[in-house]
Amino acid sequence: MLELLVALALPFKATLHAPTHTPKVGAKWAISIRVTDLGGRPIKARLTMRFLFAGVLVGKVDNGHVFTFVGTWREPKGQEITFPASARGQKLTFQAVVTARKRTTRLNYWVRPR
């Protein structure tokens, strides 16, 4: 319930798009993040991405780099996320931490590499 109240209070909308919850080990997994104002217009935002296992941080995407973008963010072509063999069968949470207009939200997406 608290997350719902926080989401309603955000001055922006952030969405995560991913091709599958079950990516192949070693294959490219291309995600995108879109951030808009409440009217649907693209806005400036910051993004960092990480992986959690049972709620515990186990890895950072791009070494924890913080990206700044306007509207939509995608991994550069050829640098998409890939899962190592050690992740096969593990249920992880991909978390995108998005900050815009002095507020932060976390977009969670479960994955189980196969």
Image (tube, grey):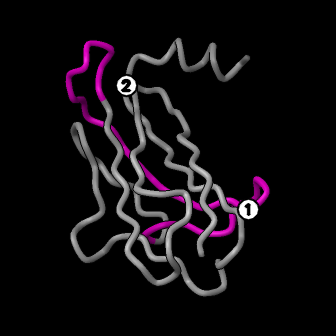
Image location (x, y in percent) of residue 61: 48, 67
Q: Is residue 71 left or right of residue 4?
A: left
**Which amino acid does the dot numbered 1 rest on?**
Phe
Q: What is the magenta segment's predominant secondary structure?
A: strand
Image location (x, y in percent) of residue 1: 73, 17
- Label 1 secondary element: strand
Callout 1: few (<14), some (14-19), or many (20+) C-alpha neighbours within 10 Å? Answer: some
Quadrant location of the C terminus in the rendered image: bottom right
Image location (x, y in percent) of residue 46: 36, 44
- Label 2 secondary element: loop
- Residue 53, disc: 1
**Which amino acid does the dot numbered 2 rest on?**
Arg
What's the residue at 55%, 20% (across, down)? Answer: 7
What's the residue at 62%, 53% (across, down)? Answer: 110
Q: Is residue 61 left or right of residue 46?
A: right
Callout 2: few (<14), some (14-19), or many (20+) C-alpha neighbours within 10 Å? Answer: few
Which region shows up in magenta?
36-62
Going from the N terminus, do you reach mark 1 or mark 2 first?
1
Residue at mark 2: 101
Most extreme residue toward the bottom is 85
Marks 1/2: CA–CA distance = 29 Å
Q: Quadrant of residue 84?
A: bottom right
Is 103 situated above or below 93?
above
